Image (cartoon, grey):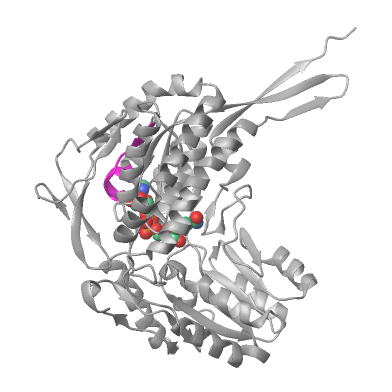
């Protein structure tokens, strides 16, 4: 809801190096999901704010693009230092804004935000371009220049983590950025804007424009000054961006939804696999694009594994995200909670049996009106049903059994999505064989969410196009130009 007056604290945009109110004076209410109370206001920015941000970025670009790479790296490292210095404040803000447990916010979100920035600060100093020799004829070398003003659009599930994952490589390679954080979780992007000023990031280099996707997001992607769009979010939004930019010449990197298969074989390391499969399904209340929500279990251990998984999931400590002992917090919004509950009802209509969970819960104390749903495991569903095919993006997973590797592979690949998969087995030949045949951008073997920032990250099919991470991100944010020099002939 857009409102124009209140005593609530107001977030501000970062435009041309200054924190500014939206020109319209309009704001969106920001709700704490664990309590259901409105606790702040976010700018409902207009195209006027966007134009000011673009103007600032265009002014800053020739200067930033021509700074020595060591200078850009130094500023980014300073920013990473400041994130580490403010880690407690940032983790608390993320837990309040998103509903995730504060420990997760600190050890994953805030930690990774600093790591992302430090990684790309270093990577840009090591980024070398290619050279191709044509023996006795010519030498080619490739120049890689920044693109100009680029857009970075991020979702609500890992707010600061994914915000920095995009901004860092864009800035490191000499681009100026218009960043649009999710309107559902804007707080850490605001705190980050303040740290950018403190770090000495030149005015206009990074501009953070808050607002809704339909309003400011849609205007940003279509803006003629935007040379590239790095987007993370839902598959339907990704498609809308593709369509909106079809008549423009912009580079696109789309990191979209997932419905990820987890393949558990009878020869897995049983106890470790139970723990890790539970973690893969329910970390961040299942609101990570990489969460394993379709669990396929070899028939000979199906009953035993499912029982152990239910036992493990029932041990999760659910409660106030600000409590250090909480392992499972609130869903991000009332609307999202309703979506998840609707999917649980659909699963029952489709013939599913709820093995554990399935209900909204109301923790005692200050979180009694929060958006909590129990971690839910559902059995007896066909692989083709909507519950197994559509992304729920919440604490809901299904279990199914398989007899052969072939059958497991077929069920895993029978999906519109293709982001990530995990395989749990001690048979290394099987793991290699299946890893090659799974139609996903990422395959984890006997692990989940183990990330090396140098590796390509992204999905196939409805899970996106293009890759981010490491060199892929540095290449995305630069324009390659080949220079061919013929040798002088004697
Ligand atoms: P979303 O698509 O609704 O929103 C993502 C961002 O896009 C927000 O900032 C939003 O304001 C903006 N936006 C919305 N409509 C827009 C438009 N028409 N033009 C431009 N911008 C627009 O996604 P969400 O609900 O915030 O996030 C959840 C989704 O993100 C899930 O599908 C999840 O799988 C996906 N996700 C993917 C990855 C990945 O790396 N593949 C990572 C995290 C989340």
Q: Position of residue 61 (x, y in %)?
A: 43, 24
- Quadrant containing the N terminus is bottom left
Q: Is residue 434 above or below residue 24?
A: below
Q: Is residue 198 left or right of residue 44?
A: right
- The residue drawn where x is 46% and y is 40% is 81
Q: Is residue 291 above or below residue 425?
A: above
Q: Position of residue 433 (x, y in %)?
A: 76, 68
Q: Is residue 50 left or right of residue 473?
A: left
- The residue drawn where x is 52% and y is 54% is 464
Q: How many marks?
A: 0
Regarding residue 382, the answer to whether it shows in the image is: no
Q: Quadrant of residue 391?
A: bottom left
Q: Position of residue 183 (x, y in %)?
A: 29, 52
Q: Quadrant of residue 164?
A: top left
Which residue is nearer to you in this view: 357 or 148? Answer: 357
Regarding residue 95, the answer to whether it shows in the image is: yes
Q: Position of residue 70 (x, y in %)?
A: 56, 26
From which residue to which does the magenta span run? 206-218
Which residue is nearer to you in this view: 465 or 249? Answer: 465
Which residue is nearer to you in this view: 236 or 9? Answer: 9
- The residue drawn where x is 61% and y is 73% is 412
- The residue drawn where x is 47% and y is 58% is 107
208 in the magenta segment: yes
Q: Residue furthest top?
A: 490
Q: Is residue 439 above or below residue 402?
A: above
- Quadrant containing the C terminus is top right
Q: Is residue 44 left or right of residue 136?
A: left
Looking at the image, in which quadrant does ligand 1 appear?
Answer: bottom left
295 in the magenta segment: no
């Amino acid at each position: 809801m857009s409102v124009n007056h209140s005593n609530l604290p107001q977030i501000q945009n970062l435009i041309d190096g200054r924190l500014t109110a939206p020109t319209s004076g309009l704001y969106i209410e920001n709700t704490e999901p664990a309590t259901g109370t409105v606790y702040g206001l976010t700018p409902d920015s207009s195209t006027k704010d966007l134009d000011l941000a673009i103007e600032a970025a265009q002014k800053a670009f020739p200067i930033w693009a021509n700074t020595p790479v060591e200078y850009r790296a130094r500023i980014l490292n300073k920013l990473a230092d400041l994130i580490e210095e403010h880690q407690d404040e940032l983790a608390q803000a993320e837990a309040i804004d998103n509903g995730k447990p504060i420990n997760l916010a600190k050890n994953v979100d805030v930690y990774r935000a600093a790591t992302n920035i430090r990684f790309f600060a270093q990577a840009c100093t090591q980024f070398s371009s290619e050279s191709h020799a044509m023996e006795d004829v010519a030498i080619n070398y490739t120049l890689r220049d920044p693109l100009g003003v680029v857009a970075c659009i991020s979702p609500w599930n890992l707010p600061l983590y994914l915000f920095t994952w995009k901004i860092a490589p864009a800035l490191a390679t000499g681009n100026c950025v218009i960043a649009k954080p999710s309107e559902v979780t804007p707080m850490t992007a605001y705190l980050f804007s303040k740290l950018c000023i403190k770090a000495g990031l030149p005015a206009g280099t990074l501009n953070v424009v808050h607002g809704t996707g339909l309003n400011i997001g849609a205007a940003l992607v279509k803006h003629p000054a935007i040379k590239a769009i790095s987007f993370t979010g839902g598959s339907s939004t990704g498609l809308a961006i593709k369509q909106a930019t079809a008549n423009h010449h912009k580079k696109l990197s789309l990191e979209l939804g997932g419905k990820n298969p987890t393949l558990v074989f009878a020869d897995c390391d049983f106890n470790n696999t139970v723990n890790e499969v539970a973690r893969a399904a329910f970390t961040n209340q299942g609101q990570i694009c990489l969460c394993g929500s379709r669990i396929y279990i070899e028939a000979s251990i199906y009953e035993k594994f499912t029982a152990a998984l239910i036992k493990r999931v029932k041990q999760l400590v659910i409660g106030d995200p600000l409590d250090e002992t909480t392992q499972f917090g609130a869903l991000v919004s009332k609307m999202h909670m309703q979506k998840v509950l609707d999917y649980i009802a659909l699963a029952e209509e489709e013939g599913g049996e709820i093995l554990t969970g399935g209900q909204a819960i109301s923790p005692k104390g200050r979180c009694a009106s929060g958006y909590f749903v129990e971690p839910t495991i559902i059995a007896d569903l066909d692989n083709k049903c909507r519950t197994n095919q559509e992304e729920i993006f919440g604490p809901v997973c299904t279990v199914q059994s398989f007899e052969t590797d072939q059958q497991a592979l077929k069920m895993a690949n029978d999906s519109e999505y293709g982001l990530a998969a995990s395989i749990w087995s001690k048979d290394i030949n099987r793991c290699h064989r299946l890893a090659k045949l799974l139609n996903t951008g990422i395959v984890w073997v006997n692990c989940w969410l183990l990330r090396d920032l140098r590796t390509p990250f992204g999905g196939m099919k409805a899970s996106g196009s293009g890759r981010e991470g490491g060199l892929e991100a540095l290449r995305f944010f630069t324009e390659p130009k080949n220079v061919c020099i013929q040798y002088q002939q004697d």
